[in-house]
Amino acid sequence: MNPVGDQLVGARVLLTGQRRSAELAAALERRGAQIAHAPTLSVVPHVDDAELLRATKELIAEPPQIVVGTTGVGFTGWIEAADAAGLADELLAMLRDTRIIARGPKTSGALRAAGLEPDWVAESETNAEVRDFLLSESIADLRIAVQHHGAGSDGLDEAFTDAGATVQPLVVYRWGPAADPRAVADGVRRVVDREYDSVVFTSAPGAQAFLDSARGLGLERECVAAMAVDGGVVAAAVGPVTAAPLRLVGIDPMVPDRFRLGALVRSLVAHLPVHATQAVTPAGTLRVWRSEAVLDGRRLSLSPAGLAVLHRLAAADGAVVTREQILAVLPGTAVDPHVAEVAVARLRDALPDRDLVTTVVKRGYRLAVADR
């Protein structure tokens, strides 16, 4: 049995991000999920970014009055890029004499790891709190350097510029096109076909790129419908900024209370099983996902037809399902009741206990559920 848990055994999850995708995948796999990858964007590493080094040299030569750090990994990456270019000592010396504003504890922790002390930390871990804090002061005519993630300013640069400050943006990594566009297109098609139980987004540009790919394939409407509240595929976003492009097209993704990968994993573990069709049988809990069924923690080897029939029986939760209702979920347009009988017989053969599906004479079939 899985050492962490089997809450997601049978669930298929599509990850659309490149950064930290291995960490996210490992956390979900430890809970039993099957992971597919379709990074919608690539990341240009900071050590190869000439623009970042140019801006760093400018700041060393003409130090700003305020430096804003928005991400811990980004701030650490900035120091690493400077170190690779032989500028770390000069950059750290400049920062020690500069007022530093940190967006949240992770950024604050990265600062302290570099031997620096933040002058103020946003408790809400949002850019909005950083913006409002600095705009509550007079920042006109000040130079402010803002360390960003790959998506850019999220409104900080514009707000400070409008208040009269001179802003130097520092983008520590940049987004590039998808390394494998065919994988992204395949991911979109599989979402449309409801082959995944969830699609996970970890950046706003990545979410937008996924929607753009769907639009380019002529499948945007179908993709949005699949990820709608009742569409069958759960969209999950690491935070409200990431969720914004999805919400603009009518998708209301699941967003954890804390905007961290760990919180995202916990939310998926808590919410995804609710979206599977479940029934408690004498052989254990049956959970029917989009593309797989699990009984008592064990995956069942079922054909698409068998999965469709089992899904319909599980949804009835012990009530009788007629042959006509069985025919309605089978592929094709068969109307012969014998086709339903054959499909149920094959399903029984694939189950560990044939008695889990019983025949109700002249009425149809039912799934054996506990205490019935």
Image: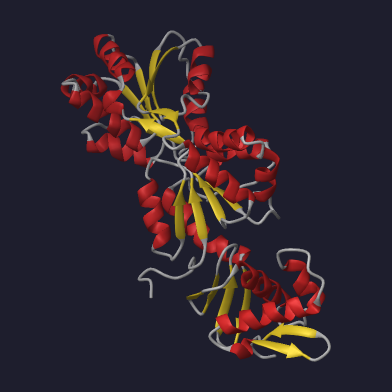
Residue 305: give x, y in percent of width and height.
65, 69
Residue 157: give x, y in percent of width and height.
48, 19
Q: In this picture, is 37 found above or below 301? A: above
Picture quarter with the C terminus:
bottom right
Picture quarter with the N terminus:
bottom left
Residue 333 horizontal side relative to residue 176, left or right: right
Count the numbered circles shown: 0
Residue 191 horizontal side relative to residue 43, left or right: right
What residue is shown at x 58% (from left), y 66% (from top)?
289
Who is closer to the viewer here, 98 or 285? 285
Residue 329: give x, y in percent of width and height.
73, 67
Q: Quadrant of residue 330?
A: bottom right
Q: In this picture, is 272 found above or below 88? A: below
Q: In which quarter of the image is residue 32?
A: bottom left
Residue 266: give x, y in percent of width and height.
47, 58
Identify the coloring.
secondary structure
Who is closer to the viewer here, 324 or 149? 324
Q: Quadrant of residue 306?
A: bottom right
Residue 297 can be seen, yes or no:
yes
Residue 322 can be seen, yes or no:
no
Q: In this picture, is 194 found above or below 87? A: below
Q: In this picture, is 39 found above or below 369? A: above
What residue is shown at x 42% (from left), y 53% (from top)?
262
What residue is shown at x 53% (from left), y 85% (from top)?
352
